[in-house]
Image (cartoon, rainbow, N blue to C red):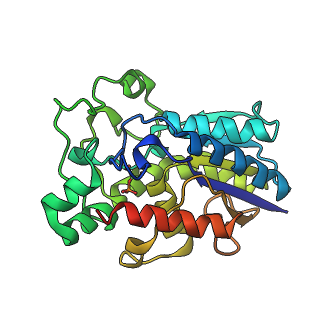
Amino acid sequence: MTGQLIIMRHGQSEWTLPDVNRFAGWADVPLSAQGREQARQAGRLVREAGLRPDLVFTSLLSRSIISANLLLDEIDRLWIPVERSWRLNERHYGAFQGQTRPAMLDRYGPERFATYRRSYDVAPPPIDSSSPYWQGSDPRYAACRSDGLDDRNPATITSESLRDLGERLLPLWRARITPPLAQGRTVLVVTHGSVVRSVVKCLEGVSDQDIRSINVPTGVPMVYDFQTGDASAPHPNGPGRYLDPDAARAGMEQVAALGKG
Ligand SMILES: O=C(O)[C@@H](CO)OP(=O)(O)O
């Protein structure tokens, strides 16, 4: 018996439309019409692959939640148990949230821009609490909603590197996601590009340097098979496989192109 992880970046958002091209991070940006269709198509791919998710995880951002719902509606599994966590949010993009990629490319130059966007351990400049995209007073991050996994407070985060994201994700990964995989269950995680990069880095041993060139397409599910048994550190049997490799390739190119100005 194997456990299966289906992990997917949400469908295209309105801010990843090429003529909008804004950094989102924790800003709660809606899906585009194409993004909604990508999420439904993802459901069809999951069905054709014979996969039946037993439980679903999303972030606290609408583009993740709605993508998961559209996918699950397509396979008649809206009823499965759901857990939502800020730990599955996109990387906090600091002061870049709401700014266009071309403007930031212009301001910082190609090298620093690429470092802020794709390096492992450099976070963008911190967001100011006067920004309309600051999450400090957003009820979804209120202290009363603490998950008790550690003492991190999402309301106070001002910017994150990919390393920071991996560190806040790990407690949820260990406590909530890997145990059902080790039991042979099928777990659907509908999340964000940087979370997928962090999981791929960890599961496939990608180096800090090589992770810079990995882009994640919107709305294409990727599957890992896990050996059952060892709940403490379950390991995938091989690399992740996109259910539609052609769509994944095209999507990765689109994401890379957004950073070219
Ligand atoms: O805006 C963001 O939060 C991310 C993902 O959409 O952008 P990028 O791909 O440039 O890291």
* Residue 199 image point, x, y percent: 52, 61
- The answer to whether 38 appears left or right of 93 in the picture is right
- The answer to whether 202 appears left or right of 239 in the picture is left
* Residue 16 image point, x, y percent: 43, 49
Front-most of 44 and 116?
A: 44
- The answer to whether 185 appears left or right of 202 in the picture is right
* Residue 119 image point, x, y percent: 31, 68
Q: Please state, as top left, top right, bottom left or bottom right, where the C terminus lies in the image.
A: bottom left
Q: Does the rendering let one see residue 58?
A: no
Front-most of 169 and 45?
A: 45
Q: Please state, as top left, top right, bottom left or bottom right, where the N terminus lies in the image.
A: bottom right
- Residue at the image position 47 percent from the left and 63 percent from the top: 254
- Residue at the image position 58 percent from the left and 45 percent from the top: 34
* Residue 104 image point, x, y percent: 20, 55
Q: Residue furthest left?
A: 107
- Residue at the image position 31 percent from the left and 61 percent from the top: 117
Up the image or down, 150 lies above or below 195; here it is above
Q: Name the quadrant containing residue 239.
A: bottom right
- Residue at the image position 36 percent from the left and 37 percent from the top: 27
